[in-house]
Image (tube, helix red, strand yellow):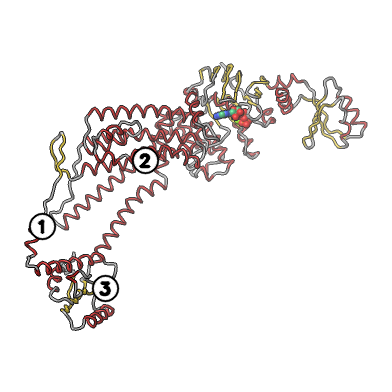
Amino acid sequence: MDAIAIDRVTKRFDSVVAVQDLSLRVEQGAVFGLLGPNGAGKTTSLRMIMHILVPDEGSVQVMGQHASDQTQDLIGYLPEERGLYRRMKVREALIFLGAIKGLGEAEAGRRVNEWLERLELSAWAEKKINDLSKGMQQKAQFIGAVVHRPALLILDEPFAGLDPVNASIIKDIMLELRDMGSTIILSTHRMEQVEMMCDAICLVNHGRSVLAGDLRSIKKSYGKNTLRMEYEGDEKFLQRPELVEKVNRFGAVVEAKLRPGAEPQEILKAAVAAGVRLTRFELVEPPLNDIFIEKVSEANA
Amino acid sequence: MRKIWLIIKREYLTRVRSKGFIFSTIGLPLFSVGIFSISLFLATRATDHTLKISILDNLGGLSAQITAGLQGKLPNGQPQYNIVKILDRPASGEEARRQLNDQIRAGELDGFIEVPKDVLEGKSALFYTRNSGDFSSMHTLNTAVDNAVIERRLSDRGVHIDDLTKLVHGVDMTMVKVSKSGESEEKGQTFVVGFSVVMILYMTLLVYGVATMRSVVEEKTTRIVEILASSVKPIHLLAGKILGVAAVGFTQYLIWGTCAMLISGYGSSMASAMRPGASVPNIHVPTSLLVYAGVFFVVSYLLYASLYAAMGAMVSSEEEMQQVQLPVTLIIVVAFLLYPVIMRDANSTTSVIVSMVPFFAPILMVLRIALQTPPFWQIGLCLLISIVTTVGIVQVSSKIYRVGILMYGKRPSVVELMKWLKYT
Ligand SMILES: Nc1ncnc2c1ncn2[C@@H]1O[C@H](COP(=O)(O)OP(=O)(O)OP(=O)(O)O)[C@@H](O)[C@H]1O
Ligand SMILES: [Mg+2]
């Protein structure tokens, strides 16, 4: 049984087709990345999984059941637009969120305390949500999504607004939940996070799936066509249009995409000839970022 | 069901614990009791010492009658007025007035009445005083002079005042309300009760209807609504919200009602202690009126609260809320503007017709029942119309709510609204 099975789903708003003939499957226990440019239909798809929206055509199954009021309680949701009752106290607001997901209030209270402790918010438990900083509200909202220990966790941009320390705490919790058997669906625009965490992805553009599957096999299918280098010296040796298609610079690291059939050896020779001191020279699979851009511009062409 | 309960509970508790609620619930009765006591205090204080006055009678012979009209007593048993001096036709009116004025300035006198020579021909009498705000004693003094002058005019024509009083003594009329259960003396209680119910209904619809709408808009602007929609059915959310806000209103009325009962109980016991035999009129209200009023009250509330909630779901900001609430508020106001029509004749054809118009029905029927119990078929028909309207509106509202809570930005046009109703 898949955690999620979306079958040929279409959703329209007036003239806009937000999601078109989309099919995707998410295995249980996986971390799944739902990617796509702005307005691609990611949030709309997630809302259909949540049964906040109902598809015009096609079917959505969650844990083997049709999406319904019953399946809602199996899911924890961190929406892209964060929101909590601003004038409620942190602890009280979180207990309410747990309770409407089916927890008893005493049990919800215990778990909220544990989570507040873990995310270092205990001191703020009796403060109003309004008094928290944006990042703290973010953490509180995350607790709201996981407090009922959902089988399926849907996170829309979970790291937005978090400092590196908190981002890494949240990341660890996500991986821990996955190890305990939860399935996680992640929608984000940060490709390096997807590469770090996701087992499988689906890339949507204009409501259609343009690339889907296991992340490792997707990358493998592109082959090792990218040179990742660190060096000191003149970069003129990379100006070989017949070999290098594109160069990306990330501070010290430079990535050069090779043309099909180009020999990396040629570039190494040119570098040595130019007297460049190489500290890193590695042939790798293309970064997800490039695959994303390529696929989207291909689809838009 | 459990989830509706949770929504109601949250809505109720956060509201009841808010400063606004505590302030308005405790503050309002305290404020009115405060104002009442202060004005009572001031009113009794104003007359709690005997006023020393003189009478300057330029016509002559009136002072005895005037004095007779100033025999009132203060609550502490002291006389209200102490007539210090009577100047009957002094040689020089000018001179006498100057002297009296000097006495007032010196504080030996609180005031004096000057009766002009031609008072019988209609010239005004004067009261000289330092304290120009004491209207209640002004009234007493005026009456005393007035009576003295009238008596003099009559006796000049050979009529005795007592004869005249007997002749012009009028007849009172008491209203007796005839209803199925028999005849009872109408002291205006049914009307007062009906009218109070109606005023409370009016306030409730406006205050708590708008509170419901505000709450919907607030959940939208804080974006909490997406989390709620991912956990609770929109119709349950709507129901929970309406009932939660209604429960807050109910609590507030309960507190006010209890306060009012305690105060009036205290007041009437105070009244009978001070003046044995005095009693506060015993308000007798037919139970049927209360039952009908209750039913129509609830129906109107559900109708308008869900309308307001639907309006709230259509907008995404406070400013827009002001605009969309107007049509609903207008319907309510128009219903109340029809009141005079019904008051004039509760059973006229016009009254019957307007009380059957869907949105007006529950509001107007309350008043009709209070004035004159309509035939049972009319009550039944009105109830049916109201319930059908309410059920329909609740359904339409919950659809608008369901689609609207996830919409941000532009307010929908009527055409778009029609499309919303078709969304699943
Ligand atoms: N409630 C709605 N009413 C009308 N149109 C909508 C609604 N929700 C989404 N859309 C439209 O559907 C399309 C897909 O929107 P969606 O929010 O799913 O995109 P997204 O992939 O989440 O984008 P982003 O990365 O910017 O969050 C957009 O064109 C959007 O305008
Ligand atoms: Mg989105």
Does label 3 or label 1 sit earlier along the sequence?
A: 3
Q: Which residue, given by chain and number where applicable, does mark 1 sit on?
A: B168
**Residue B177 x/y as whole percent:** 16, 40
Mark 3 in CB contact with mark 1 (< 8 angstroms): no
The disc at residue B129 is 3
Find residue A68 and report its horizontal and vertical position in percent: 49, 22
Q: Classify mark 2: helix, strand or loop.
A: helix
Does residue A81 show up?
Answer: yes
- The residue at 14%/73% (across/down) is B62
In the rendered structure, which amino acid carries the disc numbered 2?
Val
- Seen at 52% across and 22% down, the residue is A54
Q: Quadrant of residue B277?
A: bottom left
Q: Which residue is mark 2?
A: B333
The CB of the residue at mark 1 lies under 8 Å from ligand 1: no
The local secondary structure at tag 1 comes to: helix
Which of A192 and A9 lies nearest the eye of the viewer? A9
The residue under the point 55% across, 18% down is: A57
Chain letter of the residue beneath label 1 in the structure image: B
The three-letter code of the residue at mark 1 reads Val
Chain on which label 3 sits: B
For disc 2, the chain is B
Within 10 Å of the Cα at label 2, are there few (<14), some (14-19), or many (20+) other Cα atoms?
Answer: some
Separation of marks 3 and 1 at Cα, in angstroms: 35 Å
Report ligand 1 position as a quadrant: top right
Lower sequence index among marks 2 and 3: 3
Quarter of the image where the N terminus of chain A is located = top right
Indicate the quadrant where residue B202 lies.
top left
Image spot of residue B220 (x, y percent): 50, 36
Residue B270 horizontal side relative to residue A84, left or right: left
